[in-house]
Amino acid sequence: MSLDALSKEIITQAEARAKSILEGAKAEAKSIHEEALRRAAETTAKVEEKATKDSEQISTEVVAAAKQANQKRALVARKEELDITWDSVKDEVSSPDLDGREDILQGLIDGVESQTREMILRPVKLDREYLSTSNFEMGEDISGLGGFILESKDGSVVLDYRFDSLLEDAWKSSMSAVNKVLFGE
């Protein structure tokens, strides 16, 4: 074999080897590219799934927060309405023109007169004139919407018959009916 033929043989083998290496590299590059695309698609799907879950979670939280805020506003509005109603009732009860005021006072006096004659009657100023006709010793005026307190002479016993406490007890026991009238519940 001549040098020329040997050189051609080496070149042919080198080209064949290079072609084989190049084809292997192309196949590996294609495999790497396909794997990268697969992983990218997988990662994209995971990211989209997480984004969807996060979006749903945020949406749920926003709706829950909005519901809670609405409930809070409704409760505040209800409390304000109850406070306005309570103030209105107190204003009416504290009025000297309250229908039946003297009947209420007389009913309270009749209920305690026989048991507590030795006590001092301390009236709300508004009701002093009417209450001074009772058989009780009169004491100093007290504050309140109306009515009186009875106090033992030594101050150890105090019985509260002011409209304030009676009205508050009635208000608390009627809260269900008040809510029904105001809010339909």
Image (cartoon, grey):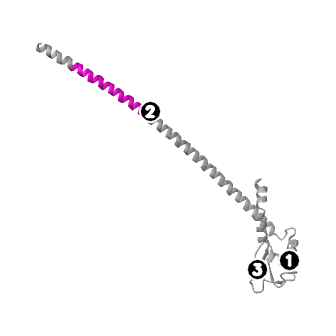
Q: Is residue 17 left or right of residue 163?
A: left
**With respect to residue 57, does 71 lie above or below?**
below
Could you say whether the residue bearing mark 3 is in a helix, strand or loop? strand
* 101 falls in the magenta region: no
Instruction: Tell me the distance, in whole angstroms, between the alpha carbons under discs 3 and 2.
Output: 84 Å
- Three-letter amino acid code at disc 2? Ala
Tally of marks: 3
Question: Which image quadrant is residue 99 in?
Answer: bottom right
**With respect to residue 171, does 14 lie above or below?**
above
**With respect to residue 53, does 78 lie above or below?**
below
Q: Which of 143 and 42 is in front in this view?
A: 42
Question: Which image quadrant is residue 121 in?
Answer: bottom right
Residue at image coords 17%, 18%: 10
Image quadrant where one finds the C terminus: bottom right
Image quadrant where one finds the N terminus: top left
Residue at image coords 28%, 23%: 22
CB contact under 8 Å: marks 3 and 2: no
Question: Which image quadrant is residue 78 in?
Answer: bottom right
- Three-letter amino acid code at disc 3? Val
Q: Which of 134 and 143 is in front in this view?
A: 134
Residue 126 marker = none
Residue designated by label 2: 41
> Whole-percent x and y of residue 4?
13, 14
Could you say whether the residue bearing mark 2 is in a helix, strand or loop? helix
Residue designated by label 1: 109
Q: Which of marks 1 and 2 is in front?
A: 2
- Please give the range of residues in magenta: 14-39
Instruction: Tell me the distance, in whole angstroms, between the alpha carbons under discs 1 and 2.
Output: 90 Å
Residue designated by label 3: 158
